Amino acid sequence: DKGKKVNENSKNEQLEQFRVNDEGKQMTTNQGLKVSEDEFSLKAGERGPTLMEDFHFREKMTHFDHERIPERVVHARGFAAHGEFEVYESMKEYTKANFLQDPSVKTPVFVRFSTVAGSRGSADTVRDVRGFATKFYTKEGNYDLVGNNIPVFFIQDAIKFPDLVHALKPEPHNEIPQASTAHDTFWDFVANNPETAHMIMWHMSDRAIPRSLRMMEGFGVHTFRFVNHQGKARFVKFHWKPILGVHSLVWDEAQKISGKDPDFHRRDLWESIENGNFPEYELGVQMIDEEDEFKFDFDVLDPTKLWPEEVVPVKIIGKMTLNRNVDNVFAETEQAAFHPGHVVPGIDFTNDPLLQGRLFSYTDTQLIRLGGPNFHELPINRPVCPFHNNQRDGFGRQTINKGQVSYHNNSLAANTPIPATEEEGGYVHYQEKIEGRKVRSRSESFKDHFSQARLFWNSMSKTEKAHILDAFRFELGKVKNKYVQQQVVDMFASVSLELSTAIADGIGATPPQGEVSESEVMKSSPALSQINTK
Ligand code: HEM
């Protein structure tokens, strides 16, 4: 099927084999036996005890008892839709990724948006990072771009992720707060891990309260690699830009909507698609030649840094349209397994230490969340191209692999799967030259935590600054431990004395030492004077 084009319907056609229409059908057990009664259990006498023999009752109840699976350890609350992606022009010069070659090809996609901290039942409009995970069902296998709506991250090394999430999630002794950063452990983590500074600036900005999932950017965050047919590699960062533009709520709206309609974002996405107002996002890439790796005043592998768009422009290369709601949220949205390690030839990794750790984490968590090693067989996770290997058995195995031999190499069977050459589409990892000692440390080039946080602050309008300040005062103001509050105030003096002084002023902390040169700007902000910080 090498020359065959994947089209936007191929995933839909595949899913069709699994759709079940129960309408107008007679009820049966899972063994296909027709059921004669579904309201009363089998009893010994009309007023007597229920009998163990009642297989229908046992099966119905057992299945119900096992309906829930663990929610995602992060990004538990999510909402998803199907769609298609088309590239505007061939990206052959930069990558051999097949789905980025031909503008006439439409690649099916499945996108899940999420919040990070709250549980499955939390509200949509909380202040939080939004996940933006896209699965491209390409003819070379599934490619997952598992991104967020903020271009940088809290930490630089995956080994800190469990700490970050333990600090961010509800506190263990009382499970409060459900989905908010307004608590001691979160800000204590921030104060003790200054690499969080840049991300916190975005987190306290209006970006963390999007108006709609249709009006939100997406970012791959990490630096990946594009590799072309000649083997030339370039560093690449991915961007999604919404056609409707980027829009946010204001905090007062976000809080009220949380109460009035906790499903605000999912309802908005669902209704837009039902009404034919299909959400659209353009895919953009920033590229840096490998030779230019050290030409910047930030480390290109540091996930707490962005590449300023005026320095490295975003090249818009294609468009994604979300045009179909799911049929069943559990089967599709909940069972979807995204993974930043799902790549196709032409897309490769870099040594970003956050990305490297993510490559381990996702399969590991999905093994327990989705009950064993066969979740790639779930309809939503199946690639639209064939898959063959010697993996066998395990909980929930669905395929019936024929034949005596399930190993490689062998001489007993003629037609067992064999690896493909690079020319035949086999994935060959980019042969980066690696040299060094085994060490547990952070590169010196990862140690500047404040420059880009400061750039972010300085690039904000007066109104945006006022919103950021308001968010700091609200979130940090709820922290009970005065020492934690003071540490955060002192830390953000390295971003802006003006900001830090104004935060201190709003929460009753001691202002940091130093001259506040820009405070007049804040005082004259019309939005600031209207802010209710309590
Ligand atoms: C979900 C781990 C950083 C975006 C998850 C899940 C885990 C995880 C365990 C749950 C997956 C599942 O149950 O299917 C990590 C680790 C990280 C990290 C260890 C850092 C070392 C990031 C970053 C981004 C990101 C930097 C954005 C670029 C997402 C998204 C989801 C997710 C969007 C939800 C996917 C979905 O909708 O199913 N992450 N994550 N994560 N993560 Fe990460």
Image: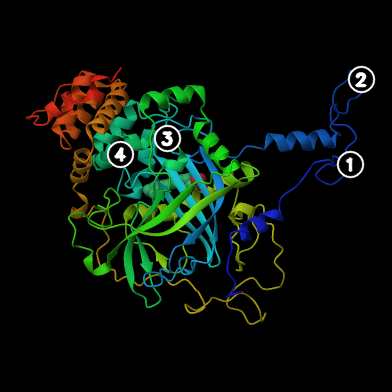
Label 4, secondary structure: give it: helix
Q: Earlier in the sequence, mark 4 or mark 3?
A: 4
Q: Nearer the viewer, mark 2 or mark 3?
A: 3
Dot 2 amino acid type: Glu
Residue 486: x, y in percent? 20, 25
Provide the residue designation for mark 3: 211
Q: Which mark is residue 202?
A: 4
Q: What separation in Å lies between label 4 and label 3 (alpha carbons)?
A: 16 Å
Is ligand 1 less than 8 Å from the beta carbon at label 2? Answer: no
Label 2, secondary structure: give it: loop
Quadrant of residue 57 within the rendered picture: top right
Provide the residue designation for mark 1: 34
Residue 444: x, y in percent? 18, 53
Q: Earlier in the sequence, mark 3 or mark 1?
A: 1
* Residue at left offset 32%, top offset 67%: 234
Provide the residue designation for mark 2: 46
